[in-house]
Image (cartoon, rainbow, N blue to C red):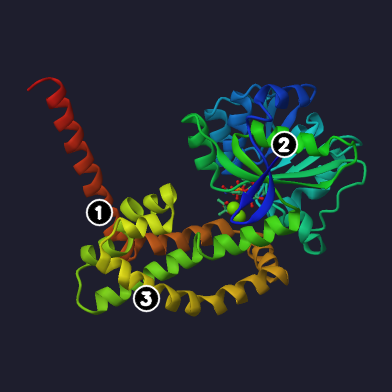
Amino acid sequence: MATINFGGVEEHVVTRDEFPLEKARAILKEDTIAVLGYGVQGPGQALNLRDNGFRVIIGQRRDSASWQKAEADGWVEGETLFSIEEAAARGTILANLLSDAGQIAVWPTLKKHLTAGKTLYFSHGFGITFNDQTGIIPPPDVDVILVAPKGSGTSLRRLFVAGGGLNSSFAVYQDATGQAYEKAIALGIGVGSGYLFETDFKREVYSDLTGERGVLMGALAGIIEAQYQVLRQRGHSPSEAFNETVEELTQSLVPLVGENGMDWMFSNCSVTAQRGALDWKGRFRDATLPVLNELYDSVASGQEAARTIQRGSTPGYRRELEAELQEVRDSELWQTGATVRELRSKATKKVEEGYALFAEGN
Ligand SMILES: NC(=O)C1=CN([C@@H]2O[C@H](COP(=O)(O)OP(=O)(O)OC[C@H]3O[C@@H](n4cnc5c(N)ncnc54)[C@H](O)[C@@H]3O)[C@@H](O)[C@H]2O)C=CC1
Ligand SMILES: CC(=O)[C@](C)(O)C(=O)O
Ligand SMILES: [Mg+2]
Ligand SMILES: [Mg+2]
């Protein structure tokens, strides 16, 4: 394992070079990986594992949209696609990729099939860290490990198909066989991770819940709404407010941050923009610090977990969630977004047509 210096702090990182796919396959050659749940992470991880040559089966509720999706992806009922219980019985590695609330309901069934020497795998520290609320307490004679891709299952699959990898964190909670560590890494490589960063279950779930509620999703959505509202109330048109809040962010500036850092994005903008952004960033940092600290406290106290479980276990919750998303989709802000995206794809087509004409020598 490589020790890499991150901004002055040393951390352990596993790379695909030092832990190649052949090694991962050799470690898991006797195993059947049962991917339980075929929502977002399930398909990404299961398809990558299958394409990487591992023995994979799916466990999913019948008569669900996810079951149909699994069939469409080439999993075959009775061969590689089973009920959750059947897959749990057949698998030696049980990859618990049900929703975090769903994991509670299914736990008694899973527990029955966690016989000595099997491996229980998660992609989130949630169930174990908050086990006072989830009741997920594994028997002592199984390995309990985690590989958490740091991004959507959709991106995990897309990057894999494109030949790349998404970074993941990994952790061992319980090592009953003495092989938990290398199994975790082998699975991390198998699901298509680029680099694997070592963590523990608690740090994974605390940082994950904070990140998604904060900058990655909650804060991003909130600050976008706020700026759009200000621009609209001050008389700007929807397209102008949207372009200056979202379109330029996603199409131009954030990709530059990803490529070479914040200072590089800044230095590719005007001096005027740089002056203003440097002057204002402290204000935004200070305004959001108390909210982010409140958020972290709410994660660490288990309050966020309680809400996730309480809402997630309510019958009809998916429909409520979809209604909330529909409200976002229907807002002027995101309706404007839909129109801007349509224009964008028309513009791309025009450019492509132009290239095609050019290539034909017309
Ligand atoms: N969505 C993502 O890309 C990421 C998810 N994770 C973690 O991976 C795990 C899986 O997350 P997602 O794929 O988003 O899950 P999801 O919310 O898409 O649900 C997965 C599956 O669980 C099944 N399910 C839910 N409740 C059930 C119940 N009571 N009985 C039987 N089946 C039930 C659903 O049919 C669905 O196929 C979670 O621990 C999540 O925190 C980690 C990284 C990213
Ligand atoms: C995609 C991801 O990593 C999240 C945002 O943490 C999640 O879906 O839970
Ligand atoms: Mg995450
Ligand atoms: Mg998450």
What x and y, as percent, mark residue 34? 72, 33
The kind of secondary structure element at disc 1 is helix
Name the residue nearer the viewer: 255 or 187.
255
Tags 1 and 3 in contact by the CB under 8 Å rule?
Answer: no
Task: Give left or right: position of 151 versus 348.
Answer: right
How far apart marks 3 and 2 lie (CA) works out to 44 Å
What x and y, as percent, mark residue 81? 66, 29
The residue under label 1 is 340
The kind of secondary structure element at disc 3 is helix
> Which residue shows up at 50% across the image and 63% down it?
215
Name the residue nearer the viewer: 101 or 17.
17
Amino acid residing under circle 2: Ile
> Which residue shows up at 23% across the image and 40% down it?
348
The kind of secondary structure element at disc 2 is helix
> Does any portion of residue 332 appear in the rendered image?
no
How far apart marks 1 and 3 lie (CA) works out to 30 Å
First of labels 3, 2 by sequence position: 2
The residue under label 2 is 185
Q: Residue 228 carries which label?
A: none
User: Above or below — where is 274 with respect to 164?
Assistant: below
Amino acid residing under circle 3: Asp
What x and y, as percent, mark residue 6? 61, 52
The residue under label 3 is 279
Tags 3 and 2 in contact by the CB under 8 Å rule?
Answer: no
How far apart marks 1 and 2 lie (CA) works out to 42 Å
> Which residue shows up at 67% across the image and 25% down it?
80
The image quarter in which residue 23 lies? top right
First of labels 1, 2 by sequence position: 2
> Does any portion of residue 344 appear in the rendered image?
yes
User: Above or below — where is 131 with respect to 154?
Assistant: below
